[in-house]
Image (cartoon, helix red, strand yellow):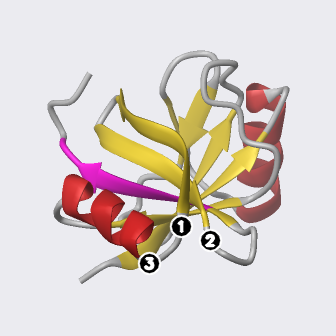
């Protein structure tokens, strides 16, 4: 079943943002290089994105699915606009889309051996 399992925050200072949430809420993060950190608790996790390759400008809800290509086709068929095509990242693949109301979301599939 598709569900929102991840929220991603933009940040120009990943370490500082990570440290803020660690201090404020005692959250534990895993660093995935200098421009990304994330909680990995398995519930709704939080990622901090400082990437210059896949920049986000606001909070990005991310929906987990079992079949990424089928989800991409379903989003397009329902009237969504693909704004970032499928790309790989450590742990999976995803794409970003805008719904008919203009909201930006991501869709990903978990692939532990990816990238």
Q: Residue 22 placed where, x, y %? A: 71, 50
Main SS type for the magenta part? Answer: strand
Badge 2: residue crowd in 10 Å (few <14, some 14–19, many ≥20): some
Measure the alpha-carbon separation of dots 3 and 1: 6 Å
The residue at 83%/46% (across/down) is 20
The stretch in magenta equals 105-111
Chain-order first, disc 2 or disc 1:
1
Residue 99 tag number? 2
Which residue is the site of mark 1?
80
Chain-order first, disc 2 or disc 3:
3
Residue 113 versus residue 24: which sits nearer the camera?
Answer: 113
Helix, strand or loop at mark 1: loop
Which residue is the site of mark 3?
78
Give the position of the N terminus as an image quadrant.
bottom left
Q: Residue 43 placed where, x, y %? A: 41, 73
The residue at 18%/39% (across/down) is 112
In the figure, residue 25 lies in which quadrant? bottom right
Residue 34 position (above or below residue 80):
above
């Amino acid at each position: 079943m598709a569900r929102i399992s991840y929220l991603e925050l933009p940040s120009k200072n990943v370490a500082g943002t990570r440290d803020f949430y660690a201090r404020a809420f005692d959250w534990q993060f895993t660093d995935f290089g200098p421009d990304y950190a994330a909680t990995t608790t398995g519930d709704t996790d939080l990622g901090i994105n400082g990437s210059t390759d896949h920049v986000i400008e606001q909070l990005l809800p991310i929906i987990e699915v079992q079949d990424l290509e089928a989800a991409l086709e379903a989003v397009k068929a329902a009237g969504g606009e693909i704004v970032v095509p499928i790309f790989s990242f450590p742990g999976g693949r995803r794409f970003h889309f805008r719904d008919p109301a203009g909201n930006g979301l991501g869709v990903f599939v978990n692939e532990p051996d990816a990238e």
